Image (cartoon, rainbow, N blue to C red):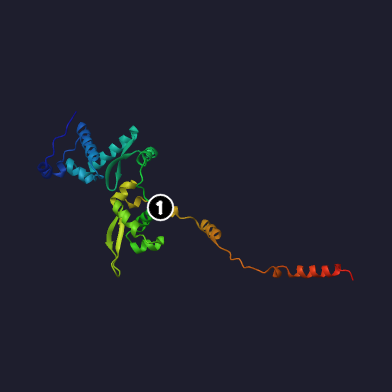
Amino acid sequence: MTDFPPPDSSAAASADASTTFVPIGDQVDAYKRAIEAIVLVAHDPVPADLLAQLLEQPVSLVDAWCDEIAESYIAARNGFEFVRVAGGFRYQTAADLTPYVERFLLHDQRARLSGAALETLAIVAYKQPISRAQVGAIRGVDPDGVLRTLQARGYIDEVARDDGPGQAILFGTTPTFLEKLGLESLDDLPAIAEFIPGADVIELLEHGLRVTPEIPVAPSAVHPAEDTVSEQTDEAAEPS
């Protein structure tokens, strides 16, 4: 087993870019093992620049090594992956094993987000920064309790203040939100147009929900001609 030399910050600081030593062979493998160890014990995704500082290697090299690590796990078809999430690297379970992982995590678990919380979180994610009043205008109900729940879970937080009167608090999503959804950035959110029904569907929905008022009509006014004919027939049937 080949080990790389211990970090020497003074040597790294004085090294000239043109004479920087590029690791090869077993040294690269040693650095990759160090990256794996750091990411494994990290609580949050580890950025490439932080890994570069810890290994005292250029960010470009560390970034390339991380890509190679990720590709090796995919090729080996392991049950876990090495992925870029929320601006850094972390381990996560393979996507095709999601049903089994969800079954394990949700077993006897009751701390799931409600439908109202998911709706509010989606509004904040797509419309951020957004105020409490704006969320309420979209949902049609007071979102104060749901926003507090999402903030307590760490999915949203106060990100700014509105410039208008009252300087309302503006909410936005957090890195925890990106991490939970497995996204690199908000740009990776699916296009909202994919979830909006077409004009033909909306027209059908409006037609189905339209209420046609019923006007009560007296029975005599429904078929007046029939009533007259009936009376005449009765008179003709009477004996003279």
Quarter where residue 169 is shown: bottom left
Quarter where residue 120 is shown: bottom left
Residue lying at the far front of the rendered structure: 239
Residue 56 image offset from top left, x and y in percent: 16, 42
The residue indicated by pointer 1 is 115
**Is 151 in front, or is 49?**
151
Residue 133 image offset from top left, x and y in percent: 35, 64
Q: In which quarter of the image is the N terminus?
A: top left
Type of amino acid at the residue the image marks with label 1? Gly
**Is 101 in front, or is 107?**
107
**Is 234 in front, or is 5?**
234
Residue 184 appearing in the image: no
Secondary structure beneath label 1: helix
Quick check: 143 above or below 54?
A: below
Quarter where residue 79 is shown: top left
Q: Quadrant of the C terminus?
A: bottom right
Residue placed at 21% from the left, 37% from the top? 34
Tell me: 196 left or right of 78: right
Tell me: 102 left or right of 29: right
Q: Label 1 crowding class (10 Å Cα cut-off): few <14, some 14-19, many 20+?
A: few
